[in-house]
Amino acid sequence: MDTLAYFINKYGIDITKESPFKLSISRETDIPQIFKELGFKIGAEIGVYRGAYSETLLKAIPGLKLSGIDLWEIYPGYRDYRKTDISEAQKEALERTKDYDCTLIRGWSNEIVKKFADESLDFVYIDGNHAFEYTVQDIALWSKKVRKGGVVYGHDFEDWSHNWRRFDMGVINAVTGWCRSYQIHPWFIIGKDKHPGWLYVKA
Ligand SMILES: C[S@@+](CC[C@H](N)C(=O)[O-])C[C@H]1O[C@@H](n2cnc3c(N)ncnc32)[C@H](O)[C@@H]1O
């Protein structure tokens, strides 16, 4: 199936207009269903935390082989979680994913990526460190691992500058800048959830 044609037809996208296109769809229900309809079977999630979204994907997509990459450690400059919280998270992720074809790999996303062959994934879900430089790095490294017609997809396309953790607008600036720099069009905002996501189909 032609993935881009699927999105354009399903959501009536007028590609003569400018990207991004906001889709009123949710990461919890619609995206797993879309990946199932597209026949996606091999994916990677960058940033697993407690494995809640890994489990959502694995439950909804029959036969999905998922690699989940996470450092499960607080490091300087990473402000999302407290130490106690993150150390329990790996155990919970293992428990949630143990009945599925899921491999959890502990390490830095920019190191673990070297284990994956280029164009070997149907999708990547980027939800690790949301700071600008990490987001750009994850998109640059992991998008190479997605096959043509696969989906590069991520979370938290939002302005966090008023949040106590002060992530600022790392994801918005990284994704917008990436898509502009590489003339990626169309690209989409997954806009139905409290925390929006973003995606594009790899050309
Ligand atoms: C927002 S959470 C992931 C949530 C998960 N995707 C979900 O929806 O349930 C972000 C995770 O990214 C991990 N992380 C942050 N920076 C990382 C890096 N450079 N390499 C690998 N993992 C990282 C953190 O340890 C944390 O568990």
Image (cartoon, grey):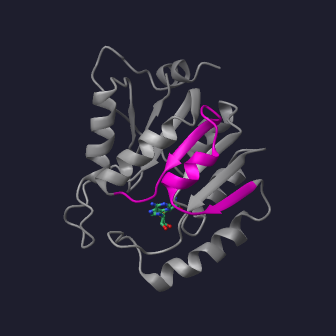
Residue 191 vertical position relative to residue 108 in the rendered view, above or below: above
Residue nearest the viewer, comparing 108 with 30: 108
**In the current view of this chain or complex, which residue is farthest to the left?**
162
**Magenta highlight on residue 33:** no
Residue nearest the viewer, comparing 33 with 81: 81
Provide the residue span drawn in magenta. 102-130
**In the current view of this chain or complex, which residue is farthest to the top?**
16
Residue 28 vertical position relative to residue 2 in the rendered view, above or below: below
- Asked if residue 20 can be seen in this view, the reply is no
Q: Whole-percent x and y of residue 10?
A: 52, 24
**In the current view of this chain or complex, which residue is farthest to the bottom?**
84
Q: Whole-percent x and y of residue 62?
A: 76, 44
Left/right placement of residue 54 relative to residue 100 reads left
Left/right placement of residue 127 relative to residue 60 reads left
Q: Whole-percent x and y of residue 56?
A: 63, 56
**Magenta highlight on residue 110:** yes
Tag count: 0
Residue nearest the viewer, comparing 176 with 189: 176
* Image quadrant containing the N terminus: top right
Residue 200 vertical position relative to residue 61 in the rendered view, above or below: above
Q: Whole-percent x and y of residue 167?
A: 27, 62
Left/right placement of residue 88 relative to residue 191 reads right
Residue at 32% in and 49% down: 171
Residue at 77% in and 65% down: 98
Residue at 37% in and 50% down: 135
Left/right placement of residue 198 relative to residue 149 reads left
- Report which quarter residue 32 is drawn in: top right
- Asked if residue 46 can be seen in this view, the reply is yes
